[in-house]
Image (cartoon, coloured by chain):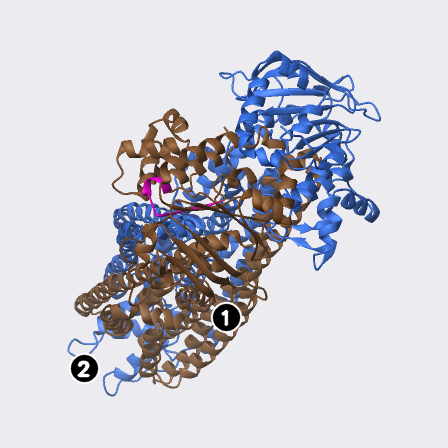
Chain colours: A blue, B brown
Amino acid sequence: MSRARKRTDATGDDNPAQVATPAKANQRSQAQIIAQQARRGRGGGGGPHGMGGVAEKAMNFWPSLRRLLGELGGQKVMLGFVVLIGAVSVAANVSAPKVMIHATNEMFAGFISRQVLHNLPAGTQVPPGFTMGQLAQFLANLPPGTDTGGFDPSAIAGMIGGMDPNRVVAGIDFGVLGHWLLLVGALYVGGAILAFLQGFLLARIVQRTVYTLREKVSAKLDRLPLKYFDGQPRGELLSRVTNDIDNIQQSLQQTVSQVLNALLTVIGVAIMMFTISWELALITIAVVPVAAVVSAFIGKRAQSRFVGMWTHTGELNGQIEEGYTGHALVKVFGRRAEVEQRFKDTNEQLYTSAFGAQFLSSTLMPLNMFIGNINYVAVMLVGALKVTSGALQLGAVTSFIQYSRMFTQPISQIASMANLMQSGVASAERVFEVLDATEQTPDGTDELPVPVRGHVEFSDVVFSYDPEHPLIAGLNLEAKPGQTVAIVGETGAGKTTLVNLLMRFYDIQDGRILLDGIDTAGVPRDRLRDQFGMVLQDTWLFAGTIRDNIAYGKLGASEDEILVAAKAAYVDRFVHALPDGYDTVIDDEGSNISAGEKQLLTIARAFISDPAVLILDEATSSVDTRTEVLVQQAMARLRSGRTSFVIAHRLSTIRDADTILVMDHGSIVEQGNHDDLLAANGAYAALYRSQFAAAGSLDDVEGAPEATTDGEPAAVV
Amino acid sequence: MLMKLTKHYLRPYGGLLLGVLVLQTIGAIASLTLPNLQANIINNGVSLGNTHYIWTHGGAMLGVSLIQIVAQICAGFLGVRAAMSMGRDIRAGLFDHVLSFSSREVNQFGAPSLITRNMNDVQQVQMLVMFTCVMIVTAPITAIGGVFMALRQDVSLSWIILVAVVILGAIIGVVMSGMVPLFRYLQTRIDAMNRVLREQLSGIRVIRAFVRGAQERERFAQANADLRGVGIRIGTWFAVLMPIVMLIMNGSVIAVWWFGGIRVDNGDMAVGNVTAFMTYLMQILMGVMMAAMMMMFLPRAQVCAVRIQEVLDTEPSVVPPEHPITPAEGVYCHVEFRDVGFAYPGAEKPVLQDISFTISPGTTTAVIGATGSGKTTLVNLIPRLYDATKGQVLIDGVDIKDMDPDLLWSKVGLVPQKPYLFTGTIASNLRYGRPDATEDGMWIALRIAQADGFVRAMDGQLDAEIAQGGTNVSGGQRQRLAIARALIKMPEVYVFDDAFSALDVATDAKLRAALATQTGTAAILIVAQRVSSISHANQILVLDEGRIVGRGTHDELMATCPTYKEIVDSQVRAEDAGLLSEGVQA
C-alpha cells in the first residue's frame, strides 16, 4: 500500500485532536509524493534510470555531498534567503496550533458553561457576571450527592480550574473566538505566501545550479583530450550529462527544501511540545525509535528486492532488445520457442521481485500509522488525566496531538530522503569524475605563417597509445606543399593514428611535427586545425539543413560559396532531387539521404573550408557504385594543389602518391614510393602481390575497356 | 484504450480486484469510524474526565485501527499482485505477438520503439493500476463515506463542504491544465538536449577539426537554457499549487470552527461533533485532491496504453498455413520465383515486379544492382520475412505460403546484411545454427568461413564471450561468424545478403573457394555489391528499380546488359582490384 493512502487515514485519526491545523504536514507530504511520482515519471527514458530511483550507493558519500552542495554555492545569497523564509514559514505553521489552543479553549469554555448551566441542580441560579473561578468554587462546594445530570462536578471543577478564572460563565464569546481564528488565518496566509516564495526561489536556485553544472560539463568536454572520448563508450558519457544531471536535479529539488523544512519543523515542534507538557512530549518522542526500527526492518528487505527488480528489468530489457534486433534470425534459425522460454523465466523473476518490493514498501505506511495511533491513545489517556486534574486544558491536549503528528511526519520524511540523496550523490560523483578528468595540455602561443603553404614534416616522432605497446618509434616523413602521402595497410587503427597526430587529437611523446617549419606543439590547436581539412569514412553531419551542414566548414560562408562548394562536390546534383533542396533537414539518423550522398556533403564541407592540408579517407563501403564514382572524382578535385594525406584504397592513388606509408598493426613498417617499395620486395610488395592474386577472379573485369576518372588511367592490376 | 487494455489483461485477476475492493471498503469504513470514536473520547471521556471511558474506547479505537491496517495491507497484497501480474502478462503478450510479426511489421515500428513499448510503456500502465488499487480507489470510497458521515454530524454545516470542494477542484483544474502541457514541452526540451549532446560526442573529431567548439558550446548553451526555462516554469507551478491547496484546507477548518462555534453556542452541536465534522471534511478534500492528482498520471498512461495496443492490434502479415503441404519425396535444394511482385501497402511503386527465376540444386545465383533496387527485399521473401504480394515463391516445388514455417526455416540458411550475433559465446552463437553441433563441427564451419584464425586467437576460443549484437568483434569478423553460423546448419538453401561486404578481397576469394567445397547440392543465392564476389555464379540477375533487367553468366551479361557493364566499369575505376580494401579491421 502506498504511503499516500496512509496519510489520509492518519489525518483522520488525529483529527478530533487536531482542532486547529488539519494535519498540514501530512497532507503536504501526500501531495508531494504524488507530485514526485509524476515528475519522476515524465523522464520515461530507457532502462532502470527512467523508471524511478534505485538507490545507487555513492562511493564517498559525505565528501561528494559536500561538493554537490558547494555547487549550490553560486546562489549563496538566494539560498540564505530561502533558509530564512523557510524558518519563518515553519515558525508560522508550528505556532498556528498553539494559537488555536485559545480558540479551542474559548469554544470549550462556552460549551462547558452551557453544560453546567443546563445541568445545575434545580433551583440553582448563576448570577450575571459569575466567573469561571467562582463557578469552580461553587461546584467544589456542592454537597455530595447533588443531582448533577450525570457528570462529576469535581472533575468539571478541575477542568475549569485550568481555564481563565476571570472568564464570565456564558456561551461562546464570538469576539474572542473570531479574534483567535483571524490570527490563525493570518498565520496560515502568511505561511502560504512564504511557502510559495520559498518554492519559487528554490526552483530557480536548483535549475540555475543544474544549468551551471551542465555548462561546466560542456566546457570541460571542450577541453578534454580525444583520448578521453576514445576511452569510453559514448552512451556512458551521454548518460552522465543527461540522466545523472537530471537525477541530481530531482534529488536537489526534493531534498533541499524538504530536508530543510523537515529539520526546522522537528526543532520547532519539539520546542512547542515541551512548552505544552514535557510528559506528553516524552511519550511522543519515545515513539520515534519504534517507528524507525520498523521502517528500517521493512525498508532493508524491500531494498534488496528493489535491487533485484532493477537487475531483472535490465536483463529483460536486454533479452527483448536482442529478440527484436535479431528478429529475422530468431525466426529463420527456429529459435523462437527457446527465446520465449528464456523471456518467460526472466519475466517471472521480474514479477516476483517487483511484487515483493512493491508490496513490502506498501506495508510501511499502515504500520507506521498504527504506531501513530498507539501514540494517540497514550497521549489521550495521559492528557485526559491531566485535564481532569486541571493541569492541562482540553485545547492544549488537542493541540498536542496535532504536534505529535507534525513531529513524526518530518522524521520519516528525512528517512525517505536519505535514499534519494544517496542516489543523487552517486550521480553527482559520476558527473564530478568527468569534471575532474585530466585535461589536454595548454595551448602554446606560436604563430603560423600566413598563408600556410602546407609543408608537413615528421621528425623523429615517437608515439603510442599505451606505454606498453610502442607504436611509432622515430618516424621521419616529409610532405612538400602539394604532395600526396598515401597510407596503406590492412588495419584501421594505424590510419586513424596518423590523423590523430596530424590534427593533434593526440600529443606525440617525442620528436616534432612541423607545419611550414613551425613545431605544431607550440601552436594553438585551433589555429593548427584551421589549416587542415578532413573527410573521413565515418561521415558526421548534424541535424540541420544541407546548407548549414556545408556552411559548417566556414564561419559566415556566403550563399555563393556554399553553392560553389556544393557544385564542386557533386552535392548540387542530388540536392535538386530533394523536395526542399538545400533546406532539406538531415534527420537524426541521416536516413533521408544515402551514405554516398553524405560523403559528398562532407567533401563539400571540406571544400568550403579551403584548407592547406587535407586528410582523406578513400574507403567507401556500403556506397553503391555510381555514387562511388562521384565521390572519387570529388575527392580528386579537392586534392589538387593541396598537401594530402590519403588513407588510400585505389591503386591509382597509391601509385601516384609521392610517398607511401605502409602500416601494419598500427605501426609504420615501410615508407617510399611505389617503384622503390616494389623493388625493396618488402611488406608493400607482398601486400601488392596478395591483392593481385586475390583479384584473380576479376580476369574478365580486367579485360574491360579502360575507363578513366578525371583523366587518370584506370588501374589494371 | 487504457480501459480496453487493462480490462483485457486484468480479467484473470478479477478475483484479486474484487478482494481489493472489499478490503479497501472495509479499510475506508474503519478509517471513517475512527473520527467518530475519537469525538466520543473527547466528548465523553476527556471533557467529562472519564478515564475509564478513554480506556475502553481507546482500546476500541486501536481495534478499529488494527482492522483498518490489516485490511489495507491485505488489499495492498492483492492489488500489487494484480498489477504486477498484469504487467508481466502484457509484457509476455507483447513479446509473443512481436515474435509472430514478419520483418515488415518490425520495421514499421522499429526495434527501439518496440523495446520501449514492451518495457517502459508497460511499466507506466502497471504503476497506474498499482496506484489505483492501493491508493486511488480508496479516495472515492472515503470521500463519499466522508460526505455521509459529515452529514450525520451536522447537516447545516454541509455547505462548507460544497464550497471547499468546488474551490479546490477549480484550483487544481487550473494548475493541472497549466502543468500538463509544460510536462510535454519539457520532454521535447530534454530530447533536444540529448540530441545536441549525442551529436557533439559522435562528431567530436569533426568539431575539433573544423574548430567549431565555440559554436557547439553555444548550441549546447541554448538547449541548456531552454531546459532551465521550462524547469523553472514547472517549479513555479509546483510552488503555487501546494500553498494554495493548504490554504483552502486550513481556510475551511477555520470556517468550520467559526460556524460550528455558532451551532455549539446554540446548543445544536457538541464540540466533539465539530471536530469530527472537520475530520470528515478533510477526508473529502483529500479524496478530491487525489482524484485530481491522478489526472496527472492518466494522460501519460493513456499514451502508453495506446502505444501498446497499437502493437497488439497489428496483425502479422505473414501467417502460417492452416493445412501445411510437405514437399514431395526426393525434391530438395530447389528454389523458384514465379512472377513475384512485392509492394508495401500504400506505396506508389512496387519494390519488386515480375521476378521469375529458378535456382537448381548445387548452383549459385547472384543478384546485383544499385542501392534501392530491391535486392534485400528479394532475399527476404525466401524465409518469409516478407510475403510476396504477387506471384509465388516455391521451395522444393511447394509455395512457401503453404509450407510449415518451421520446415521452411529449417531449409534456409540466412546470412543477413547486418550480421547480428547474440549475447553468449562463439559456441552458443554457432549452436544457433545447429543446437547439437559438436566442437569439431564448429571448427570446420569456422575454417570454411575463414574465421578459425581469429577465433583461435581469442581468449577462450569457442567459449570467447560475445557481447550483444556482436559489438566486441570487428565487422569483418562478425560477418564471418554469421557465415559459419549458417554453414553449420547445413541448409538446403543458402542466402547471403551482401555477406562479404566487410571482407577484403583476398579473404572474400578464399572464403568463396572454401564454400564451394562445402555447399554440395545446396541452392545458393548471393547478393553482393562487388562484382568480384559474384562473377563466378552460374546465373547472375541484374536488378534495376525492382525488375530483372539482365540475367546470365558474367560473360553473357558483359556482352548483353548495359546496366551490368556500367556497374562493372564503375567498380574497375573505383576499386582498382581492391588493393587494401577495408577488410580485416583490427
Q: Of helix, strand and loop, which one carries label 2?
A: loop
Quadrant location, the C terminus of chain A:
top right
Q: How many marks?
A: 2
Q: Nearer the viewer, residue A379 or A465?
A: A465
Residue stretch in magenta:
B485-497
Residue A642 appears in which quarter of the rendering?
A: top right
* Three-letter amino acid code at the position of disc 1: Ile
Give the structural element (helix, strand or loop) at label 1.
Answer: helix
The quadrant the N terminus of chain A occupies is: bottom left
Q: Position of residue A211 (x, y in %)?
A: 60, 46
Disc number lying in front (1 or 2): 1
Tell me if residue A396 can be seen: no
Residue B487 included in the magenta stretch of the image? yes
The residue marked by circle 2 belongs to what chain?
A
Indicate whether B118 appears above or below A73.
below
Q: Residue at x 31, y 78 (%)?
A: B145
Q: Is residue A112 above or below residue A703?
A: below
Would you identify the image quadrant in which residue B311 lies?
Answer: bottom left
Q: Which residue is mark 2?
A: A147
Q: Amino acid at mark 2?
A: Asp
In the rendering, at what x and y percent does residue B26 appear?
Answer: 23, 72
Residue A447 appears left or right of A150: right
Q: Nearer the viewer, residue B113 or A670?
A: A670
Compared with A176, A714 (above or below) is above
**Residue under circle 1?**
B172
For residue B201, side relative to residue A123 (left or right): right
Question: Whole-percent x and y of residue B586?
Answer: 50, 28
> Taking the image as drawn, is residue A521 in sight?
yes
Q: Residues within 10 Å of mark 2 (few under 14, many from 20)?
A: some
Q: Measuring 55% from the left and 43% from the top, which residue is drawn there?
A: B554
Q: Which mark is on residue B457?
A: none
**Distance CA(mark 1)–CA(mark 2):** 55 Å
